[in-house]
Amino acid sequence: MQKYSLSSLLPIYLLQLFFISSIILLSGCSSSKDTDGTSFVTGQIQMVSNEPFAKLGLVNDATLYLLDCSKEMDEILYNNQGKFAKIYYSSVNKNDEGIKVLKVVNAEILTGRDSK
């Protein structure tokens, strides 16, 4: 029977830990898709930056998304600041500062148990 020392097994365990944590991290950072295949992100609606440059944003865990939406949708989201919403989007781009900008298609304000 061959004996293994802890120092010889440690790199194997560290490698396994690295791969498992990478998979968890990547799956947690991705957005979701609805049953019809539409991409969405849930988070809290907030105003970002200062006047006169304030923009609507969505905060999801530690990620900030800027929202690019129509005037009607902008007004709805503006009036629901601080609430949680499910934002459906068609595309994701990055602005000059490297912040993700979602092209908003639709939004659903979440209430009750759905709000987190």
Image (cartoon, grey):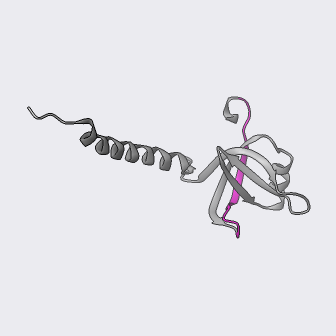
Q: Nearer the viewer, residue 37 or 18?
A: 18
Residue drawn where x is 71% and y is 53% of the image:
106
Up-down relation of residue 97 to residue 62 (above or below): below
Q: Nearer the viewer, residue 16 or 49?
A: 16
Q: In this image, 3 relative to 27: left or right? A: left
Whether residue 103 is in magenta: the answer is yes
Residue at the limit of the structure toward the bottom, as seen here: 96
Residue drawn where x is 69% and y is 53% of the image:
64
Number of numbered discs on residues: 0
Indicate the position of residue 27 as horizontal and vertical percent values: 49, 47
Q: Which residues are magenta?
A: 96-112
Q: Quadrant of the C terminus?
A: top right
Residue at the limit of the structure toward the right, as seen here: 52
Indicate the position of residue 15 as horizontal and vertical percent values: 34, 47
Residue drawn where x is 27% and y is 40% of the image:
7
Occupied quadrant, residue 97: bottom right
Q: Nearer the viewer, residue 71 or 30?
A: 30
Up-down relation of residue 104 to residue 22 (above or below): below
Whether residue 36 is in magenta: the answer is no
Q: Nearer the viewer, residue 8 or 36?
A: 8
Indicate the position of residue 89 as horizontal and vertical percent values: 65, 57
Residue at the limit of the structure toward the top, as seen here: 113
Indicate the position of residue 84 as horizontal and vertical percent values: 73, 40
Occupied quadrant, residue 73: bottom right
